[in-house]
Image (spheres, rainbow, N blue to C red):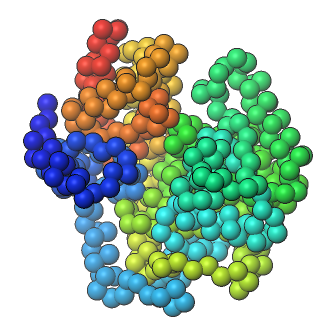
Amino acid sequence: MRYWDRSKQMMEEGMEYLFRATPYIEPILSYGKGSYVWDADGNRYLDMNAGQFCMTFGHNYKPFIDRITKQMTNIYHSNTSALSDGIFEASKLMAEINQYNVSKTLFLSTGSEANEAAIRYAKFYTGRNGVASVDKGYHGLTLASQSSTMAGRWSLPKVVGTFSVKTPVYIHSEKNVDEETFLSECIGELKHLFKTVGDQLSSFIVEPIIGVGGMAKIPGSYLRELRKQCDEYGVILIADECQCGFGRSGQWFAYEMDGIIPDMVTTAKAMANGLPVSALTMRKEIAEKVEGRLTHFSSHQNDSLAAAAVIFVINEIKSRNLLNENRKNGGALLNAISEVCKMTEDLSNPRGWGLMCGFDINNTIISDYRQVSSKLREALLRNGALVQAVRQGRTFRVMPSYCITEDEIVEFKDIFERAVKEVFFSKWK
C-alpha cells in the first residue's frame, strides 16, 4: 500500500495555478531511473508507460544524458533557415532504417506537427484537399490531424473534405458476422470510398498498429489493398508510426510487417528518448517535386539537439540489438499478461507486437467498464505499476522501455495479479 500525503499536499497547492488539461494520478513524480519512477512520498513504481511511451531506454539513461549534455555545450538550437552538421547524419540514418524507401526527412517537435506537415505536403503535391483515415485512428489534436482522429468527432470545426471508413479490427467490432466476412466488408467499404471520392483525396493516413483507438493491428490484407487503391487513384499513403514505430514492434517500423511501402512516414515518441522530437520522412520523388515550392516554418525545425538525440537512439538500438530484444521481451511480456488474463473472465484479448501490448476489459459481461477500469488502474498504481487505459477505459496498453528486464517483467506480472485479485476477487477462478 502506498501513501501520498506529500503528493496530495503538492496537488492541492499547485493546481491553483496549473491548468487541468487531463485527469492526473495522485502521486507526484520526482525521480526516475531505468524502468522505475519515484514519487514525492518516496514510493517506487514500475513505469510500464515508459513516460508517455517516449523513454526508449528508460529514465536517467546515462549514455544518452552524456551525449545530450555534450550537444548542449556546443549548439542545440538555430534559426529555421540555418542547419547544423548533425542534421545531415540524422536524416541519412532515417533513410537507412526505412531501407531508403522513404528517404527525405524534415525534423519537427511532435507527432501532431509531423502529421500536419505530411497532410500539408500531400495536399500540395496532389493538388487535392481530401484526407481519409480509419475511424479509430489517432493522429493528434491539431486541426487537420484531429479531423482525422476518431473520424473527427472532437474536431471543432472538422476540416472540410475529411473522410473516414470503418476500422478493420474484429475484436472490437459488434461481431454480428464472422471475422472473414467482417474484414471483407471493411475492404469493400474502403474500395467504395476510393470509387466515390478517390479523385478528391490527397492522402490516406493510417497507423499500422492502432494505438489510442484500441491497441490492435490493421490486417495485412487490408493494408495491401489500401496501398493498391492509393496507387490506382494517385493518393499519398501516410504511415503514422508515431507510437508503433522506431523499433517498438520489434521492427524499425510496423509497416514492414506486411510488406507495404508508404509514401510518407511520420515518427515521434521513441525516436528521441523523451525529448520532443518528431519527423516526416517521404519518398524522394515526392520531395523533389515540393522542395523549394512550399516552405515550412517551425521554431524547432531540424534542430541540432533533435539530430543528436535521433542519431544516439538509432545507433543505440543497433549496437544493443534492441529490435531482437524487443521481440524476445515482448513475447515474455505478452505471455505474462495472457496468464493473468486467463485467471478471470473479466479480462480478454491479450495481444502484442514487440513491446506494444494490450488487453481489454471484457465489456460483453461488464457494462460499467469505466468504473471497473478506473478501479484496476488504481489497484495497479497502489501495488506499484503505472499503466494507462484507452477507449474510455475498455483497453489497457502496456508499453515499457526497450531496456526492460526479465525480472521486471516478472515483477509486473506479480503486481498485475495482485491488482486483478483486488478488483475481481469475487469472480476469481
Q: Is residue 344 left or right of residue 61?
A: right
- Camera-side residue: 234 or 390? 390
Residue at 83% x, 44% y: name it.
193
Residue at 53% x, 55% y: name it.
141
In the rendered view, tell whether residue 175 sits above or below residue 197. above
Indicate the position of residue 134 as horizontal and vertical percent values. Answer: 68, 43
Q: Is residue 208 left or right of residue 67?
A: right
Indicate the position of residue 152 as horizontal and vertical percent values. Answer: 63, 47
- Camera-side residue: 97 or 53? 53
Query: From where the camera sits, is residue 97 visible?
Result: no
Q: Is residue 306 left or right of residue 284?
A: left
Q: Quadrant of the C terminus?
A: top left
Query: From where the camera sits, is residue 2 visible?
Result: yes
Count every numbered label the image shows and give the total: 0
- Camera-side residue: 378 or 243? 378
Residue at 34% x, 43% y: name it.
23
Indicate the position of residue 316 as horizontal and vertical percent values. Answer: 40, 65
Residue at 72% x, 62% y: name it.
263
In the current view of this chain or complex, which residue is farthest to the bottom? 82
Q: Choose top left, top right, bottom left or bottom right for residue 411.
A: top left
Q: Quadrant of the N terminus?
A: top left
Q: Choose top left, top right, bottom left or bottom right for residue 379.
A: top left
Indicate the position of residue 347 as horizontal and vertical percent values. Answer: 43, 21
